[in-house]
Amino acid sequence: MNNEEQLVIFELNSQHYALPIQETQEIIRMTSITRVPNTSHYIEGIINLRGRIVPVINLNKRLNLPVTEYDDDTRVIVVEHNGQQVGMIVDNVHEVGKLSGEEIEPPSVAGEDVGYLKGVVKKGENLWLLLNLDEII
């Protein structure tokens, strides 16, 4: 990693997660989603984002976390991954934080499905779980 990187810090089930800002296109308020039948359980459907059809996933469902009710804090983080725009529903977006290489550690949890973690960021007393979009999308 380079000297300093910016991260979008967001919340799922009272835990803080992070994505590199360069993977993030925009953050929008929750909008109406058109359901699409016969898709994976974590795909909520599609939205029309300024004329583009964007699939939307529920990140809580994708990571096998308890699903929370949508409220005024619920946001959709639109990312672009391998040329595909995808919206990810999160409970809350907190801030854009800075990360230096010394603050990230490899994920040290054992389990069969933790490939979605790229690392753990230590910021003082806070821990942010850095997500790996290759495994999520």
Image: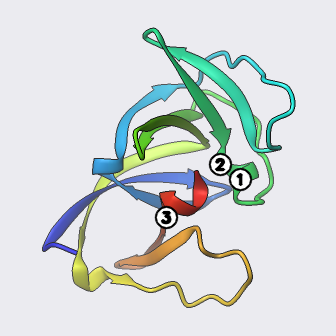
Q: Dot 2 lies on which element?
A: helix
Q: Nearer the viewer, residue 10 or 77?
A: 77
The quarter of the picture where residue 38 lies is top right
> Which numbered disc flags the more N-terminal residue, 3 or 1?
1
The Cα–Cα distance between marks 3 and 2, rounded to whole angstroms, is: 12 Å
Q: Position of residue 53 (x, y in %)?
A: 54, 18
Label ID, residue 48: none
Q: Amino acid at mark 1?
A: Arg
Please say if the residues under marks 3 and 2 sit with CB atoms less than 8 Å apart: no
Farthest left residue? 3
Q: Is 9 rendered above or below residue 71?
A: below
* SS at circle 1: helix
Q: Residue at x 61, y 30 (%)?
A: 55
Percent from the top left, x then y, of residue 19? Answer: 41, 56
Query: Is 2 on the left-hand or right-hand side of 125?
Result: left
Where is residue 134 shown, x and y percent of the image? Answer: 51, 60
User: To which residue does mark 2 refer?
Assistant: 59
Amino acid identity at mark 2: Leu
> Label 2 neighbourhood size at 10 Å, few (<14), some (14-19), many (20+)?
many
Q: Dot 1 corresponds to which residue?
A: 62
The answer to whether marks 2 and 1 mark residues whose Cβ atoms lie closer than 8 Å is yes
Q: Which sits in the foreground, 84 or 98? A: 84
Inter-mark Cα distance, 2 to 1: 5 Å
Q: Is disc 3 placed on a helix, strand or loop?
A: loop
**Res 58 → quadrant:** top right
Q: In the rendering, which numbered label is found on residue 132? A: 3
How does the figure colour the protein chain or chains? rainbow
